[in-house]
């Protein structure tokens, strides 16, 4: 028996030793796991309840690096429900919201509450949440708007969506929760501030100029557009379309099918009218026709059996080029157009940028507009119509601004531009490449036409574009559309394209008043008001 007993004792000792070894290994492992940084962080996160107070998307700046979005704040509260703050929170909301807020309080989980009422209570933390847009938003047609997921739908927001999303700054508040998933009132919440990332897209728009044209246009134009351009660089300093819309309340604007406030009229084509007489004059002067060339206006002209009338039905009499521009005499410019010839007139229009759209920025384009074809120019009546801006010609306000810029900058066609570049620090700009201006007419011809246009504003009788505070030049236009209202009256677009001051111009301003009649009574007064407002900016 003794050998058998000795075997049992030996096996017992081995089993016990193995058990102790396994227990020791398990104990060490548990000790390691309990102190593992990764698992400790996981456990801590699992006990946190995080609210995202703000996701501030990248900026959109004007040319002076002044923000055009994220400019206003609204008060927001992070609430950790407790028995002591329930009543103050309920008192701060309207009667209509109390039931839904009470449900949130009863859940005992932290939540965000927006109210204009001040709340002073324990475990209620105030935050200021920046608002992407304002009710009266600057340049909404250019900036665009976001969808429900925070992605750009139109404008700069869409064209630069990846960059603006990448530079989103988050502000979060994290609460410590107990084992039942309830907030712990005795523990201060952790505020995680994403920082003030200043990165953004920098526009050519000048915030002051944009404010001026939106204020004037909203008062004076029911439908239309205003464009302000730097005539030497092509930079668009202001562009507004009317009626406008607010990105904070899109439904009403989307449903307004009569006025279509969502479309950007500044970048769309319209019948041009007499502003185009600038191109006809340029073609005539380049062809060697003297500015002293005269023609007789009897109130109408017969072009191969087609009667084309002047706006002055009893005629202007004998005019030279200067007086014809001042009086905006259709028969005189028909005389010039027919003398120059259809091909030369069409080629000059193309040189001035008509019929050619531009990409102003990523996802933002101007329309091409339309020109008659070379085949059309074989018909003298088509040449006559083009000579004073009618027929198959359409153009955008931006194209008309390009035309006027060439007149005042010495004869160079500038490429319109809307974006200067990107900034990462909110102080310096990584600029995009420019398209070099192209000389399309001589400086002498440009200077001659510029003097005509100064005469139109500063000397002509009854010119409503005349500013009170600064000199200027420009040309009216009244464009027939071939469309009629319910009473049978033809709808006409009023235009004014001008520059200021008259000597060494700083800005070109184009005003379109859609379907309202004569340019001198609808668009010219708008130019005058804008010019006076810009005069104060120039003086600074």
Image (spheres, grey):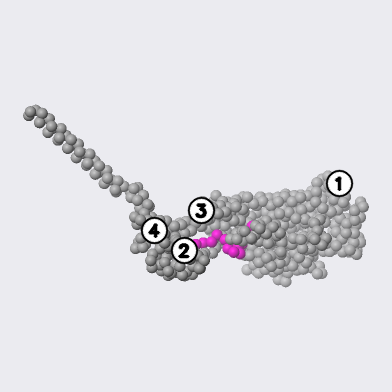
Which corner quadrant holds the N terminus? top left
Relative horizontal placement of residue 131, taking residue 111 as reference (left or right):
right
Lower position in the chain sequence, tag 3 or tag 2: 2
- Estimate the spatial distance between the alpha carbons at disc 1 and disc 3, rounded to whole Å: 57 Å
Is residue 284 left or right of 367 when viewed as pictured? right
Q: Which residue is mark 2?
A: 101
The numbered disc on residue 167 is 3
Question: Which residue sits at x=39%, y=58%?
Answer: 175
Judged from this view, the residue extending furthest toward the left is 2
| Front-most of residues 58 and 218 | 218
Mark 1 or mark 4, whichever is nearer to me:
4
Task: State the mark number for residue 435.
Answer: none
**Circles 2 and 4: CB atoms closer than 8 Å:** no
From the image, state whether disc 2 or disc 4 is nearer to you. Answer: 2
* Residue range (magenta): 128-141
Say which residue label 1 marks: 378
Residue 215 x %, y %: 66, 66
Identify the element where label 4 is drawn. strand
Residue 490 left/right relative to 467? right
Mark seen at residue 175: 4
How many residues crowd mark 1 within 10 Å: few (<14), some (14–19), many (20+)? few
Ranked by sequence position, the earlier of labels 4 and 3 is 3
Q: Is residue 50 magenta?
A: no
Residue 13 in sight: yes
């Amino acid at each position: 028996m003794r050998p058998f007993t000795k075997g049992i004792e030996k096996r017992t000792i081995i089993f016990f030793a193995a058990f102790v070894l396994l227990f020791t290994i398990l104990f060490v492992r548990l000790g390691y796991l309990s102190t593992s940084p990764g698992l400790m962080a996981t456990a801590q996160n699992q006990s946190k309840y995080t609210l995202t107070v703000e996701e501030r998307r990248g900026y959109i700046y004007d040319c002076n690096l002044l923000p055009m979005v994220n400019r206003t704040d609204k008060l927001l509260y992070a609430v950790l429900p407790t028995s002591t703050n329930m009543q103050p929170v309920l008192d701060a909301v309207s009667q209509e919201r109390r039931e839904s807020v009470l449900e949130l309080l009863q859940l005992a989980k932290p939540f965000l509450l927006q109210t204009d009422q001040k709340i002073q209570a324990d475990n209620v933390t105030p935050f200021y949440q920046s608002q992407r847009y304002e009710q009266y938003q600057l340049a909404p047609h250019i900036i665009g708007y976001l969808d429900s997921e925070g992605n750009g739908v139109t404008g700069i927001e869409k064209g630069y969506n990846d960059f603006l999303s990448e530079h989103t700054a988050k502000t979060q508040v994290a609460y410590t929760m107990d084992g039942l998933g309830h907030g712990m009132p005795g523990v201060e919440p952790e505020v995680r501030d994403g920082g003030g990332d200043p990165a953004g897209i920098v526009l050519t728009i000048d915030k002051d100029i944009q404010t001026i044209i939106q204020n004037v246009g909203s008062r004076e134009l029911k439908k239309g557009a205003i464009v302000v351009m730097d005539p030497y660089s092509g930079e668009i300093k202001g562009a507004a379309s009317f009626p406008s819309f607010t990105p904070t309340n899109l439904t009403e604007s989307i449903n307004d099918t009569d006025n279509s406030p969502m479309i950007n009229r500044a970048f769309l084509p319209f019948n041009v009218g007499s502003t185009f007489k600038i191109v006809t004059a340029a073609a005539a002067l380049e062809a060697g026709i003297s500015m002293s060339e005269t023609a007789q206006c009897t109130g109408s002209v017969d072009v191969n059996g087609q009667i084309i009338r002047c706006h002055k039905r009893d005629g202007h009499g004998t005019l030279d080029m200067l007086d014809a521009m001042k009086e905006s005499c259709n028969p005189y410019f028909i005389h010039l157009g027919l003398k120059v010839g259809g091909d030369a007139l069409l080629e000059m229009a193309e040189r001035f940028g008509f019929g050619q759209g531009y990409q102003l920025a990523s996802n933002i384009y101007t329309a091409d507009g339309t020109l008659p074809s070379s085949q059309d120019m074989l018909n003298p009546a088509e040449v006559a119509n083009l000579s004073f801006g009618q027929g198959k010609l359409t153009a955008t306000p931006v194209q008309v601004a390009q035309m006027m810029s060439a007149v005042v900058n010495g004869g160079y066609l500038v490429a319109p531009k809307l974006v200067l570049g990107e900034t990462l620090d909110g102080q310096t700009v990584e600029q995009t490449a420019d398209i070099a201006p192209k000389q399309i007419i001589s400086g002498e011809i440009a200077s001659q036409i510029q003097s005509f246009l100064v005469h139109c504003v500063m000397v002509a009788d009854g010119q409503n574009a005349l500013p009170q505070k600064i000199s200027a030049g420009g040309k009216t236009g009244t464009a027939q559309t071939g469309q009629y209202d319910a009473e049978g009256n033809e709808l006409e677009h009023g235009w004014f394209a001008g520059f200021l001051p008259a000597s060494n111009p700083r800005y070109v301003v184009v005003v379109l008043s859609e379907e309202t009649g004569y340019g001198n009574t609808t668009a010219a007064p708008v130019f005058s008001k804008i010019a006076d407002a810009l005069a104060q900016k120039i003086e600074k």
